[in-house]
Image (spheres, rainbow, N blue to C red):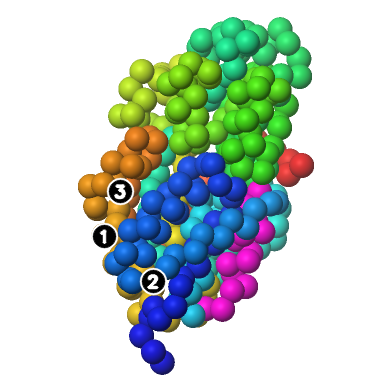
Amino acid sequence: ETTWPNRPVRFIVPLAPGGGLDFVARVVGESVSRAIGQQIVIENRTGAGGTIGIETAIKSPPDGYSVLVTNDNVASAPHILKLGIDYLKELVPVIQLARQPLALAAHPSLAVSSVAELIETAKRQSGLGCATSGAGSNQHVLLEWFAQMADIKLDHVPYRGAGQAINDLIAGHVRVAFLGPTALIPHYKSGNLRLLAQSSETRSPNLPEVPTLQEAGFKGLVLDTWYAAFVPLGTPPSAIARLNTEMDRALADPATAKSLLQTATEPVGGGAEQLARVARADSEKYERLARELNIKAN
């Protein structure tokens, strides 16, 4: 058994380029690549709400050369899409990479500048479409949860990743979206989009002027995204330990942290057991929300 790694390592990313997950994978991947002296190949395996990429990783050889870099779809999708599989039992946690709020964005043509105004508009206009980066995602859950609390109807328009959703939002083809802020921030700063709210407990330091959904009157409506690395069951513990060390080191690097914070993404790091706890708690939360909100997969 030669020491890991002696060839390029594949990061399987279950969402398309252009969103927060892909950005985190690339920023961390560059740093890890330098540290281990091997190329990191980013492979975007998209579709079916992230499940194609996740299942690709589960079925990959457990040799330390296939790493799933995913968002919390790994905890939410099985419950929302009724998959009858617990991904967390098929994967070994490596490290929680980062977390960020979700953002509620609107096209300027909708002429709303607050959550309250959006609710008024949605009550007047039936069939207001709301984009997310996929069915079964936490954005899908947040949309349904918000609509139920606000007593409005929003038509879910799922995309295959944030990139496509944002293109349609900027073009005004869809006029409201729940998305991660990474790809929204540049368009928000340039005035092409409005950000009405963020879904975290407190305001992101990078978006200090955007209120939280709680501040907008929705107590308890908190749903952050997290990004994490997992490997297939049976991956050698030595490879997992090295991956954890190098990823943790990358996240602690001031340059990496700065890149992430500019996109309202907070580096996390820590041990594998910390990720295991977060993922399991969220899986239980999504199971409950899927049931209470009666979320349909389509």
Between 44 and 243, the one lying in front of the other is 44
Which residue is denoted by mark 3 in the rendering? Answer: 256
Residue 263 horizontal side relative to residue 132, left or right:
left
Q: Is residue 157 magenta?
A: no
What kind of secondary structure does the magenta stretch mostly adopt? helix
Which residue is denoted by mark 2 in the rendering? Answer: 38
Please report whichever mark, 2 or 3, sits nearer to the chain's N-terminal start. 2
Residue name at image x 60 percent, y 31 percent: 166
Which residue is denoted by mark 1 in the rendering? Answer: 249
Residue 298, quarter of the rendered image: top right
Mark 3 or 1: the one toward you: 3
Q: For residue 43, which numbered disc appears in the image?
A: none
Residue 45 horizontal side relative to residue 157, left or right:
left
Residue name at image x 60 percent, y 27 percent: 177
Is residue 212 placed above or below 41 in the rendered structure?
above
Q: Residues within 10 Å of mark 3 (few under 14, many from 20)?
A: some
Start and end of the magenta stretch? Answer: 49-62
Q: Position of residue 43 (x, y in %)?
A: 56, 60
Helix, strand or loop for disc 3: helix
Q: Amino acid at mark 3?
A: Thr
Residue name at image x 30 percent, y 48 percent: 256
**Real-space CA distance between mark 3 and mark 1, rounded to the nearest whole angstrom:** 10 Å
Helix, strand or loop for disc 1: helix
Is residue 169 placed above or below 183 in the rendered structure?
above
Quadrant for the N terminus, please.
Answer: bottom left
Q: Number of numbered discs present?
A: 3
**Real-space CA distance between mark 1 and mark 2, rounded to the nearest whole angstrom:** 16 Å
Q: Residues within 10 Å of mark 2 (few under 14, many from 20)?
A: some
Mark 2 or 3: the one toward you: 2
Q: Amino acid at mark 2?
A: Gln
Q: Position of residue 163 (x, y in %)?
A: 59, 38
